[in-house]
Amino acid sequence: MVLVRLCKVALIAAIALFFTLVAFGNITDYGSNWLFVQHVLSMDTTFANSNLHWRAIANPTLQEAGYLSIIAVETVTALLLWVGTVRLLAVVRSDEFGRRKSLAAAGLTLGILLFAVGFISVGGEWFAMWQSQIWNGEQKAFDFIAMIGVVMVILLLPEAAMA
């Protein structure tokens, strides 16, 4: 039982590390993904004859606000997951373990929402990111949702009482 719980904690920590590295990368190498956000929001690489270009955001201040929002969500997600990891690890041998999943579940949910809402719905559909041959992050977003979702399912499996 303890080994299974430690496996769950390790998976939460792995996703926490992922979000930590993503946020750290976006902060320390701000320009790399800044270009991605600029191009997606400005819709400058979508189909030339698209009737959706009215949705484009070309204002650099609004583009930067969007990018900073993404980094903020990544950072909050990492923090929730690290705190969730520590809380679960502290009670790994206790019947309290099942009741301590909430912060980890919240972090995983926020991570899924970032990619499902932010990248697939808003970026992919509203800003037609799927039309871009160069600036299309939909597949990576789906990959991240799958990775995080599997950990969410494993985390939320019911706990057996400790003997």
Image: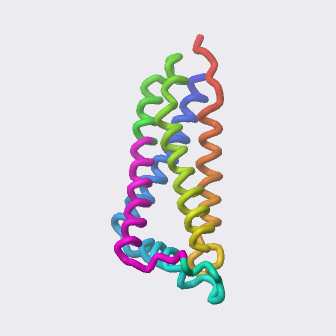
Residue 91 left/right relative to 7? left
Q: In the figure, residue 1 lies in which quadrant? A: top right
Residue 103 image offset from top left, x and y in percent: 46, 35
In this picture, is 99 found above or below 48? Answer: above
Residue 109 image offset from top left, x and y in percent: 54, 44
In this picture, is 160 found above or below 17? Answer: above
Q: Main secondary structure of the magenta part?
A: helix
Q: What colouring style does the render use?
A: rainbow
Determine if the magenta segment contains residue 68. Answer: yes
Extreme top residue here? 163
Q: Residue at x 42, y 73 (%)?
A: 34
Residue 18 left/right relative to 120? left
Q: Residue at x 46, y 47 (%)?
A: 16
Residue 30 image offset from top left, x and y in percent: 36, 70
Q: Residue at x 63, y 46 (%)?
A: 149
Residue 86 left/right relative to 120? left
Determine if the magenta segment contains residue 144. Answer: no
In this picture, is 102 found above or below 110? Answer: above
Residue 17 image offset from top left, x and y in percent: 46, 50
Q: Residue at x 46, y 53 (%)?
A: 19
Q: Quadrant of the C terminus?
A: top right
State which region is magenta: 55-80
